[in-house]
Image (spheres, rainbow, N blue to C red):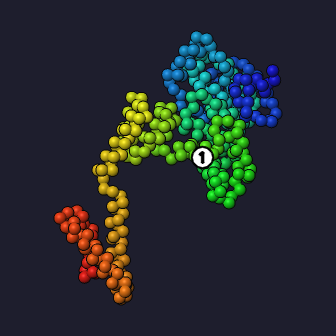
Amino acid sequence: MSQRRELEKLTGLDNLFGDDEEKSLSDSTLPLSQIILPPSQPRRYFDPIKLKSLADSIKEVGLLEPIVVRKIQEDKYELVAGERRLKACEIAGLEEILVVIIECDEKKARKLRLVENLQREDLNAYEETIGILELLAEEVDVDQETVVKLLYDMNNESKGNSNHNVMVSDEGRIIQDVFLRLGKITWQSFVANRLPLLKLHLDIQTALQKGEIEYTKAKEINRIKNDDERQKVLNKAIAESLSLSEIRILVGNILTSQSESKPSSHNQEQKEKADKIYKALRKSKIWNDEKKLKKINKLFAQIEALLEENKDDPSLQQGSLVSENSL
């Protein structure tokens, strides 16, 4: 088996290299003390229970799949793929670990890490979204904000809402190619269903990142704008493993209570509008125009009639417009 096919077999990253030339590799064992993590590692959260289970399995039968590393200096190797296995071996108390040593530059190593992370079976929607954005940014060689803008521009163009030719640009072609190679989701579906995840509240994003709650439940809880109320529901949903229907009832009750306990924002806007009209009328030269003055008098009459209807309710008279005489 060629070196390249051996790497594909061990890492499952056969869609990464494309037509790149084969990379030299060797398999060996290394002391855990010689393996370091890169400054930026895409994997963000490990379920402690599952990690302990893997460590117990390694104690019993050994590590079945090597990790992948690259040499960066004498007696120092940087992890490329397999952080979960590395951590499990540390928990298991091993001093050495089976590795595959490859030769690649930092850019290729980052890409390997990102793709390996995206192939995890336990990846949740939020982690996958961030992972894909990171990979796209790496491939297009721009920051993630620019990638998001490019995706929205492509989406608008595909719907005929833009004259930009992003789809046929180099960046657009690279983005489309990455989604095809990943085979997880189309770029159109990614824009419609995944990019909105970036607008979730920070506490919701954190819970998704940790794999503590499903995406559909997180979206429902995210409807609560009050930070304290949202955190309470989030904690309860996680601790008690609430169903989506139970969460919907909780969220619905909170939103209803909040709307009943505070004045309508629309009402406040109307009051502010009345104040602006009052001030504008005082400064206006409209009083010198007889035709317009007649119209104003009719409006005043209508307003006074409304106020008369509600004269027994003082709260409805606050902030009302004054009569023409006071002007």
Where is residue 83 drawn, in percent x and y?
A: 61, 27
Question: Crowding near pointer 1: few (<14 within 10 Å), some, many (20+)?
Answer: some
Q: Secondary structure at mark 1?
A: helix
Amino acid carrying mark 1 in the image: Val
Q: Does 43 sit above or below residue 321?
A: above
User: In which quadrant of the rendered image does the N terminus lie?
Assistant: top right
| Residue position for label 1 | 191
Total count of labels: 1
Q: Residue at x 52, y 19 (%)?
A: 52
User: In which quadrant of the rendered image does the C terminus lie?
Assistant: bottom left
Q: Residue at x 24, y 69 (%)?
A: 307
Where is residue 33 drawn, in percent x and y?
A: 62, 23
Q: Does 167 sit above or below residue 184?
A: below
Q: Quadrant of residue 228?
A: top left
User: Do we see residue 90 in this rendering?
Assistant: no
Q: Does 213 sit above or below residue 313?
A: above
Q: Quadrant of residue 186?
A: top right
Please identify the residue farthest to the left as the structure is shown: 312
Q: Residue at x 57, y 42 (%)?
A: 194
Where is residue 230 drawn, in percent x and y?
A: 39, 41
Please tell me which residue lies in front, 198 or 47: 198
Please tell me which residue lies in front, 251 or 128: 251
Please tell me which residue lies in front, 276 or 39: 276
Relative placement, left or right, of 39 versus 317 is right
Q: Residue at x 61, y 51 (%)?
A: 152
Relative placement, left or right, of 322 versus 106 is left
Q: Does 272 sit above or below residue 134?
A: below
User: Do we see residue 147 in this rendering?
Assistant: yes
Where is residue 205 drawn, in percent x and y?
A: 49, 40
